[in-house]
Image (tube, helix red, strand yellow):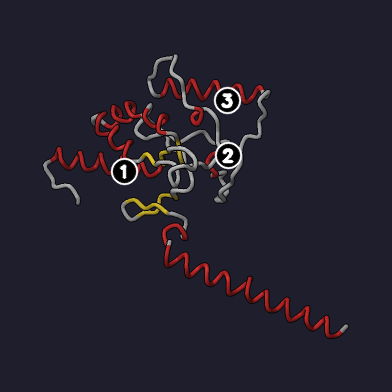
Amino acid sequence: MIKLIIQAVRQTILWSVVAGIMYPVVMTIFAQTAFPKQANGSLVEQDGKLIGSALLAQQFQGSNYFWPRPSACSYGTGGTGITASSGSNLGPTSGALHTNVANNIAAFISGNNLPTNTVVPADMIFASASGLDPHISPEAARLQVSRVAVSRGLSEDKVKELTERFVEPPQWGFLGQARVNVLLLNVALDRLQAESKRAAAGAPSKG
């Protein structure tokens, strides 16, 4: 009996060290060496200031930015400083869901000055399961190009070209669908407008 207890204690100590200390240390060192950006949360900076993560959606308001998909959790803000993740949990027979869908369609069409019969992409109608999805479909981004260009006084062709550069193909070519990261696109949009203003003022653009 004592022998079995000693063996059990030894096994507990051994695997606590292996799984609780050695494995996390090795994986942390590997991640920080091979994938430092991803290991630290894929953080995004603008002008030296941390503005978010490429993995988490945030709300962009106004006509001069591309809009993310709707969020049932207010993009995780919640006023508590803690990022919350949740969907609406409304079923297909829910009257509230039908109301939300109708409002989202109307807001997207009206906000982008689109024809009333425009087919709005599903990702701009329904919130994601997490409420923090950072991507929208290429179609949803393209429908916003004209509004953003007019609001910023930029060429629509330039904004369209920028948008197409941020279309990410399915992962490894076959997983998921093509998508656009809204935060990264909006950061590049700010950069494009700054460069356009410098060019108009005759100042050299930053390389």
The mark closer to the camera, 1 or 2, is 1
Q: Quadrant of the N terminus?
A: bottom right
Query: Residue at image x 37%, y 44%?
Result: 184
Of the numbered discs in the image, which one, if any, rests on residue 100?
3
The residue carrying mark 2 is 73
- Mark found first going from the N terminus, 2 or 3: 2
SS state under label 3: helix
- Residue 51 in the image, given as x and y percentages of width and height: 40, 50
Q: Quote the CA–CA distance across marks 1 and 2.
A: 26 Å
Choose top left, top right, bottom left or bottom right for residue 68. Answer: top left
- Residue 100 in the image, given as x and y percentages of width and height: 57, 25
Q: In this picture, is 60 found above or below 93?
A: below
Query: Residue at image x 33%, y 30%?
Result: 148
The residue carrying mark 1 is 188
Query: Residue at image x 30%, y 41%?
Result: 190
Q: Residues within 10 Å of mark 2 (few under 14, many from 20)?
A: many
